[in-house]
Structures are given as structure tokens and as C-alpha cells.
Image (spheres, grey):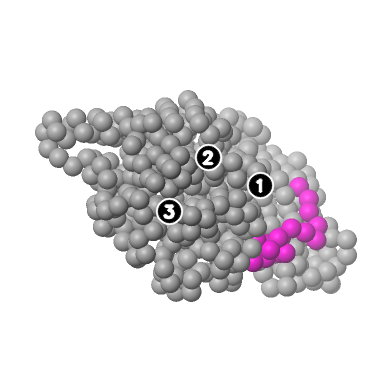
Amino acid sequence: MDRRIFVKTLGSASALSLLPMTYPSGWTNDQTSWPRPNRAQLAWQNAELGVVFHYDLHVFDNKKYGQGNNRIDPVPDYNIFNPEKLDTDQWIKAAKAMSATFAILTVTHETGFALYQSDVNPYCLKAVRWRDGKADIVQDFVTSCRKYGLKPALYMGIRWNSFYGVHDFEVNGEGDFKKNRQRHYNKMVEGMLKEVCTRYGELFEIWFDGGASSPEKGAPDVLPIVKRHQPNALFYHNDQLAEARWGGSESGTVGYPCWSTFPFKSTGAGESAQKQIYDNNFALLKHGSPDGEYWMPAMSDAPLRGYNGRHEWFWEPGDEDHIYPLENLMGMYYKSVGRNSTLIMGITPDPKGLVPDGDVRRMKEWGDEIKRRFNTPIAETRGEGEEVILKLSKAQEVNHVIVREDIARGERIRKYSIEGKNADGKWEKIFQGESIGNKRIERFETRRLSTIRLRIIETTERPLLRSVAAFYVI
């Protein structure tokens, strides 16, 4: 079904009443055929801001991280892993102060080393002298998340493994030698995934670094394991399914407009992506498609240490000057969370096992600023239909309006305008835009207003507004 045939362009801006809307024949208020989020997707979009902690063997070598060689060169001595002061409580308290609502840990990354007690992968914490080979950082991390009220999520890197000689899901070798090693690697990965899905309670998301390919291409069969053992976790992603999509850059932003719907059920990665996906610098990932058949909201991601020409997902020596300034972080927030995307920031624990002091301070400054700006609206309402009116208690200064659709019922609004009644009692247009979704933050020059009006210009179904809120930010 082509959803575009149902788009309705609504009337002029003159009407003020909240009259019932009329719909084309066959257009109901609750069509089940429209894309909608499942439970995991809805929770993930509502979460809005999270962190991912990258930790691996090369954090301890005191050298600059090089992704190319890290994917192919095994670490000479895995016993360099020795975080003497490791404290996952400190990590999670820093994330909570940043206003994050969920946290992700790299269980494995490109070295293949696993941060828990695996029974199927010998290249794990059992192998090191640190804590007598009995440590389980995944368990520590999950426990800290639950202690401080963040939702725990896990990240598995299975596309590259320098220890096992795996590159882009394929083990090195030829003939039966390669075939047998590939079978062993796939079975090991599937066993590891079952371990992490069954040992640590409910998880918020399972993230596969660079995707997870699919068994049809000879890769491990991961989707059934996640769906069986973690049915409420967001699955991200393989060739069979993507319950979220990468937002097209690692800048912490997405394009405008940004829709939650997508024309394909999966995205692929790099050269495996469909041509329409990687064309025009990943424009489709950055914007989505209002006519897409699949609910696949956008993820924005960036490392906290990504300022002034650096882009560091892992701790490196002498990198403290490259923590993003607060102004840049707020810019990301407006262009990610404020554009209907979930933002995930990369945080870098150091060789001692702690998030460095400078990072912790900046994270708290950012969280405090988000709360200062947006925790207390001047006024807030909800509603449905062609117009939603927000009356303020008195005429006062306003420079932000935040609008949220009830996305549990789908993403319905295509075009809208925001208007305000000024001191002369006249309506003036503040902004006209498209795509609201879970959250749209509109920032504008300060105006003195007594009433704000959201007008829906085009919509596919009866508009359902979860919130219309006004703010004055100085």
C-alpha cells in the first residue's frame, strides 16, 4: 500500500477552534497497517540519551589506537590488561550525571578479547592474571547500571577478530581448513551470545559492531538467539533485521528532517549496504523516509573525545584536550534528540579502570545544562487534531517549543507550523517544519507571547500530540 495517497493537506491558519477532523473514505483513526514501534523500539526512542563504554586490550599499550592494524594484528601480550582501580560504579554515576538513561558496554571488540567469564571463548578474562582470572566486568557493569537506575545494554564485535584471524566475518585460510575454522568461529560466537543473553538479566539493547551479517552469507546466526533470550532488547543489527539504524555519521547528529520509518527492513553496513542506502553520503540513513514501510528510528553517535580533529572511541594518552566543549555537546543534543533521534556518546575508561576526571566533569556539566534548559517548561499541554493551543499563565518570553507525537500510534504528522500570539494580540508564525516523531526541539529568537498554537498542515492520520511545551532558556 502506498501510504502517500492518504496524506491530507489541512486548511489555512485562520481557524482557532479544535474541531473534529474529517478523513478520506477508508481512513480510520487507528490503522494497523501503518508502521509503529515495537516495545523495544518505543523504549529506546523514549530513552533519548545513552552512553557506550569502549574498553579493550589496546587501552593498556600506551599507544595511539589504529583501527586498521588493530583488526589484523593480535595483541602480543594480553596480560597487559590490568585495570587496578576498575570501578564500574564510577562509570555509571558519571553517565547518570550526564542525563543518560542507558549504558552499553563493549563485551568484545576488534581484538576478540571478551570482558567476562566465557565457557566457549578461551580468549577472555579467564586467561589474564588480573584478579586471578576470576573477574567479570560485564557482571560488574550490569550490577552498577541497576544500582544507579540506568538500563544495561551490551555490544559484541564479531565482524573482526584479530586473535582468531577474522576479517569482515570471514576467517583466514582456504579450502577445508577455512571451512572448519569458520564453523568453529560461528559456533563460538553463537555460544558467547547465548551466554551474555542468559547470564545477566534483561538487557536494553544488543549492539553488533558493524552489524552481524546473516547465516545465508556464512556468518553466525545471531537473530534467533537474541529474540529467544532477550525478546525486549533492541536488536541492532544484521542483514535480516535492524530495529534501529545508524544515523549516517559519527558526528552525534542526524539530518533534518529525520523520520522514524525506512524503506528496507535492514541497512547492511559499508559495502554490504544497498546502493540507495550509501548513496549521497548516506542521506537515506540521515533522513529516513516518510513513506517507509518499516519502523527503524535513527541513532546518533559520537565519541566524547572527538573535538578539534580527533575522534577517539578508546582512551589514548595525552588526549584530554579533545573533549568536546559544552557548547558543541548542546549543539549535538539539539540536532539529535531534538530531531527525533536517540543519541549515544562514546566514553573512554582509562588503563586504571576509571573514566578520567576531565571527562567526568564535562559529562556532569552537560547533564546539568540539559536539565537547566528543559526540566521545567513554562507551560505544557497535549492534544489531538488539526490544532493544539497552549495558553501561558501570562504574556512572557519564550524561545523554545518542544513538540512530541504519540509515536506508539505511529509517526503521523508530515508538516506543521508553530505560531504565537504576541503582545498586540496578533498571531505570528514562528516556525514551519516537517517531521516531529518522538521529539522536535524548535529554538527561535525570544518573543513575548501569551499563547502558542501548533497547526498541523499535512498528516497521514489524525494527529496525536503527546506534548507541546514552551521554554525560556537564557
Res 108 visible:
no
Find residue 461 and report its horizontal and vertical position in percent.
62, 40
Q: Residue furthest right?
A: 394
Give the CA distance from mark 3 to mark 1. Answer: 25 Å
- Which residue is depicted at the point 46% across and 34% down? 196
- In reply to whether residue 368 is colored magenta, the answer given is yes
Find residue 452 and report its horizontal and vertical position in percent.
77, 60
- Residue 328 lies, with reference to residue 439, above or below; the image says below
Query: On the rendered structure, is 222 left or right of 201?
Result: left
Describe the element under mark 3 as helix, strand or loop. Answer: loop
Question: Are there few (<14), some (14-19), or many (20+) residues within 10 Å of tag 2?
Answer: some
Residue identified by numbered label 3: 82
Amino acid type assigned to the residue bearing label 3 in the image = Asn
Whether tag 3 and tag 2 are in contact, CB under 8 A, the answer is no
Q: Which residues are magenta?
A: 365-382
Find residue 286 and report its horizontal and vertical position in percent.
45, 55
Sequence-earlier tag: 3 or 2: 3
Amino acid type assigned to the residue bearing label 1 in the image = Tyr
Amino acid type assigned to the residue bearing label 2 in the image = Gln
Query: On the rendered structure, is 214 left or right of 403?
Result: left
Res 23 visible:
yes
Find residue 40 and report its horizontal and vertical position in percent.
56, 36
